[in-house]
Image (cartoon, grey):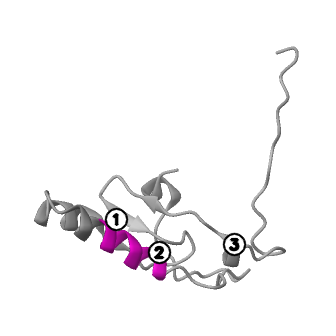
Amino acid sequence: MAGTNSRIGFISPYSHNFCASCNRIRITAAGSLLPCLGQTQSIDLRRVIRANPLEDQRVKSAIYAAVMLKPLGHEFTHAVTSTLTRCMNMTGG
């Protein structure tokens, strides 16, 4: 496409620990709110919404609790074994 300015970026967690400035969270299709892709902690946001369908403050509090779980730094390693068992296709993007 003529005139299109495309840019490709790479996430380099091994050489650049960007966790301290990360402002990303993800919600899986199953309703789990993930504060960090490299960690196993999550909040069951679907359960909170279903239990409190008319209480926005409870949902906001759950989201805030998830954000507070964000680590200051990742624990990615080059090791062959990993404690993270969630595949990216389960996470969504």
Mark 1 lies on a secondary structure that is strand
- Mark 1 or mark 2: name the one nearer the start of the chain: 1
**Foreground: disc 3 or disc 1:** 3
Classify residue 72 by image quadrant. Answer: bottom right
Q: Residues within 10 Å of mark 1 (few under 14, many from 20)?
A: some
Q: Is residue 50 above or below residue 2?
A: below
Question: Disc 1 and disc 2: Cα gap in Å?
Answer: 13 Å
**Identity, as a three-letter code, of the amino acid under mark 3:** Ser
Q: Residues within 10 Å of mark 3 (few under 14, many from 20)?
A: few
- Residue at (40, 58) in percent of width and height: 27
- Residue at (12, 66) in percent of width and height: 51
- Mark 3 or mark 2: name the one nearer the start of the chain: 3
Mark 2 lies on a secondary structure that is helix
Circles 3 and 1 in contact, beta carbons < 8 Å: no
Q: Main secondary structure of the magenta part?
A: helix
Residues in magenta, as a range:
60-68
Mark 3 lies on a secondary structure that is helix
In the rendered structure, does residue 66 fall within the stretch colored magenta?
yes
Q: Is residue 10 above or below residue 77?
A: above
Question: Disc 3 and disc 2: Cα gap in Å?
Answer: 12 Å
Circles 1 and 2 in contact, beta carbons < 8 Å: no
Q: Nearer the viewer, residue 82 or 66?
A: 66
Question: Disc 3 and disc 1: Cα gap in Å?
Answer: 22 Å
Disc on res. 32: 1
Residue beneath disc 2 = 67
**Position of residue 75 measured from the top left corner of the image (x, y, whole percent):** 64, 85
Left/right placement of residue 34 relative to residue 31 reads right
In the rendered structure, does residue 73 fall within the stretch colored magenta?
no
**Position of residue 1 measured from the top left corner of the image (x, y, whole percent):** 82, 15
